Amino acid sequence: MASHIVGYPRMGPKRELKFALESFWDKKSSAEDLQKVAADLRSSIWKQMAAAGIKYIPSNTFSYYDQVLDATSILGAVPPRYGWNGGEIGFDTYFSMARGNASVPAMEMTKWFDTNYHFIVPELGPDVNFSYASHKAVDEYKEAKALGVDTIPVLIGPVSYLLLSKPAKGVEKTFSLLSLLPKILPIYKEVIAELKAAGALWIQFDEPTLVLDLDSHQLQAFTAAYAELETTLSGLNVLIETYFADLTAEAYKTLTELKGVTAYGLDLVRGTQTIELIKSNFPKGKYLFAGVVDGRNIWANDLASSLSTLQALEAVVGKDKLVVSTSCSLLHTAVDLVNETKLDDEIKSWLAFAAQKVVEVNALAKALAGQKDEAFFTANASAQASRKSSPRVTNEAVQKAAAALKGSDHRRATNVTARLDAQQKKLNLPVLPTTTIGSFPQTLELRRVRREFKANKISEDDYVKAIKEEIKKVVDLQEELDIDVLVHGEPERNDMVEYFGEQLSGFAFTVNGWVQSYGSRCVKPPIIYGDVSRPKPMTVFWSSTAQSMTKRPMKGMLTGPVTILNWSFVRNDQPRFETCYQIALAIKDEVEDLEKAGINVIQIDEAALREGLPLRKSEHAFYQKWAVHSFRITNCGVQDTTQIHTHMCYSNFNDIIHSIIDMDADVITIENSRSDEKLLSVFREGVKYGAGIGPGVYDIHSPRIPSTEEIADRINKMLAVLETNILWVNPDCGLKTRKYAEVKPALSNMVAAAKLLRTQL
Ligand code: GLN
Ligand code: ZN
């Protein structure tokens, strides 16, 4: 019985690759130093999997930046502006594409399906001259072989590569990416031939786009591509790996009829309907790589349940054709539980990070083969049972309250226009009111204070004093700038999700549970393990302290339930919406306490609402319904005179505009600064929007200081399509990562622009 791992995290258990990369980029270490760290990581991962007993161990899943960029390098598809002159692609060209260089910006980055991983989007036009320009896949295969590990080299499949690309500048509207298939397949053939010559017996093509909504033309491309590769692939076992969702019946049919393919890797954690497809029709003599161990989460596998799924599948596909695998690459989970020193043993027993998942895969494979490790299975069963019954997980009051929410809409009683009138009587704001999104620059000093307080190195009194001083500074600055609705600056927060997670029950935090987000960047999502409740107010003290320092309205600042959910590892023992409703109830308590404390404007950030959109269109409506409902739950109980703001961090919201309206916030501030046109087109097309709206008037991601004229010009453009009395003036996101030297003049120009336009209305 065999076992397989789809892919493995590259960063290392203690983010070794991150530090090596950043040191190399800062010119503090050499290319050889970086290569050495990378080779050591690869070697230890391969050896670890071999020692665990895994039969099909992947290679070429390591990357210095991103696996899609690696595929671009293999194909020599370097956009001309990087001035590459052929030959093997080296660090210079590679990192220029990834991060830009002094004269050319980086290539575009976008989210990898519905994960928090971001890949570098290939830019392809009719003139690309493909050539075999990176031998990385073959080099890694040989490197592992030299260490005594025969691996299964992994390539991004040719069709997914093209479907994930974007047309180069100038041909955006006209170019069919799939028309490049005949041009890239010859390069794939070269790679395959070289892998064969090096001794590879298997090859894995990742074709995750097969789980998307594809039309027949796109499905046909898979058929054509593998038919064309068939001769070159002969003699190899060929695995096509899909992940992240169910396959449609059409996609399953296309996949299982591909020429020259011997094995199918399927995500059986998210693909519950895929299991039915397998049971109803699986091609004779082919391998099923059954992804039963979740690569997207941190929970220990329910081994008994997986084993019974596998046994049922074994009856369908045959004993020697079933391979136990992960649902997708382990890239999307944390690396190794061994390094978690702060989690208690009970919670730890419920978890499995990548290293532990490798062991689970192997244990399942052995059990199927009749060599069940009884002790391991027993320990797993008792951990599963303890998770089910632990009082830390279940809070009946919360469960009841969440269940009671169903069936109701939770809308504010008065419509938004009437509410805005009532709020205006109280707030008395000028037209084109100015505000900011929440955070002000976080200085090193501020970070030090927070760190020392957490480590008990300074007293609570000293901490409160320091934070109060910071808030006072921020309030004074905003008054001096003459901003209308103030913020306290969020100096007490490290991170907008962690800050709330730490104060809510049902959350745990890791020390090293890092997951790669892009390049050397990693995030450390909190773990939601239990019913969520709010033991006591979380922000009321700071917000009312800030309000006491000014006569102007001070915004209370909260993170919304959907964003907290989407940026955490979520429990898998209840539906996501249930967990979201629980968080919504906790935030609702906070909203109401803020209101009682005299805070009249409350912002509930939903930066990640759109991120949670499922991959398949058929699931969008359901997600949007409960996500938007969760948001409304947080504020349906406030008075008309309390103004609810929300904020979102992306410009591309055309596809969710109706959800945004349905959130029924009084004011929404959104990122817009990189694409006025997209936003404006929504309103030009006649979408009725009656609430307040603040499309960011400048880009906070850049140190550049926008001039008053430039900002005024942009506000004017928006005034051309939006009613004057609903438009707000604000930057496009929080100012946390900027310096005061940038923030002061930028905000000063922003206020000047608003004032200038007020005189012209
Ligand atoms: N209120 C948060 C801030 O200003 C919002 C951050 C975000 O949208 N990502 O930092
Ligand atoms: Zn934002």
Image (tube, rainbow, N blue to C red):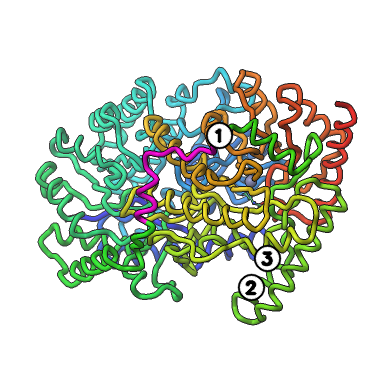
Circle 2: is it few (<14), some (14-19), or many (20+) Cα within 10 Å?
some
In the rendered image of this protein, does residue 8 appear above or below residue 130?
below
Circle nearer the viewer, 2 or 1: 1
Label 2 – label 1 distance at C-alpha: 37 Å
Q: Which mark is residue 660?
A: 1
Residue kind at label 1, given as amino acid type = Ile
Give the amino acid type for the residue marked by disc 2 in the picture. Answer: Arg
Secondary element type, mark 2: helix
The residue shown at (68%, 59%) is: 543
- For label 1, the crowd category at 10 Å Cα-Cα, with few meaning under 14, some 14 to 19 and many 20 or more, is many
Q: Please, what is the three-letter code of the amino acid marked with disc 3?
A: Lys
Residue 220 placement: quadrant: top left
Beta carbon of the mark 3 residue lies under 8 A of ligand 1: no
Q: Which residue is mark 2?
A: 451
Would residue 359 appear left or right of 640 to someone viewing this image?
left
Which residue range is magenta in the image? 399-414
Residue 40 x, y percent position in the rendering: 46, 66
Question: Dividing the image into 4 quarters, which one contains the N terminus?
Answer: bottom left
Q: Is residue 199 above or below residue 188?
A: below
Apparent side of residue 486 relative to residue 231 in the rendered image (left or right): right
Residue 40 can be seen, yes or no: no
Q: Secondary structure at mark 1?
A: helix
- First-in-chain label (2 vs 1): 2
Residue 28 has which mark? 3
| Label 3, label 2: how far apart the Cα atoms are | 27 Å
Residue 319 lies in the magenta stretch: no
